[in-house]
Structure formats: C-alpha cells, structure tokens
C-alpha cells in the first residue's frame, strides 16, 4: 500500500509532463505539414550532368 502512495503521484506527474510536451509541440507547429516531408524526399533537385 505504501508503494501506491508513491507511484500514483509519480505517474500523474509523468502524464502531465507528457501532455505538456505534446501541447507544446502542437503549438510550435510540429504537426502542420505531415505530407510535405514525405513528398520532399521524392523531389529530385539535382541538375543532370551534361
């Protein structure tokens, strides 16, 4: 029983830290363009050799 008194607040704190990190990443625009990076690798920017 004593372990639960320690583990529950630690779990709640870890959950709040994770939620805060997720909200920070959403607000900073990390999820704005999910398809851009996936399609950018297919774009060939190299100039052909003569």
Image: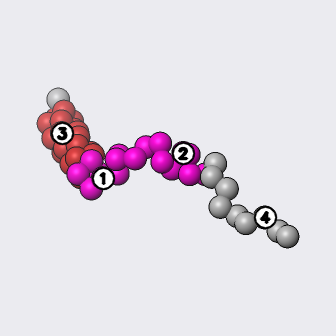
Residue 10 counted in the magenta span? no
Q: Residues within 10 Å of mark 4 (few under 14, many from 20)?
A: few
Residue 11's tag is: none
Please report contact status of discs 3 and 2: CB closer than 8 Å, yes or no. no
Mark 3 vs 4, N-terminal side: 3
Residue 12's tag is: 3
One can see residue 43 in this view: yes
In what element is the residue under mark 1?
A: loop
The residue singled out by tag 4 in the image is 48
- Residue positioned 70% across, 64% down in the render: 46
In what element is the residue under mark 3?
A: helix
Q: Residue furthest bottom?
A: 50
Closer to viewer: mark 3 or mark 4 = 4
The residue singled out by tag 2 in the image is 38
Could you tell me how far apart the alpha carbons at marks 3 and 2 are, in whole angstroms?
A: 35 Å
Q: Residue furthest top?
A: 1
Is 37 drawn above or below residue 12 in the view shown? Answer: below
Could you tell me how far apart the alpha carbons at marks 3 and 4 are, in whole angstroms?
A: 56 Å
In what element is the residue under mark 4?
A: loop
């Amino acid at each position: 029983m004593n372990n639960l008194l320690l583990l529950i607040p630690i779990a709640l704190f870890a959950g709040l830290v994770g939620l805060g990190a997720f909200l920070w990443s959403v607000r900073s625009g990390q999820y704005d363009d999910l398809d851009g990076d996936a399609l950018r690798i297919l774009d060939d920017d190299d100039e052909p050799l003569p």
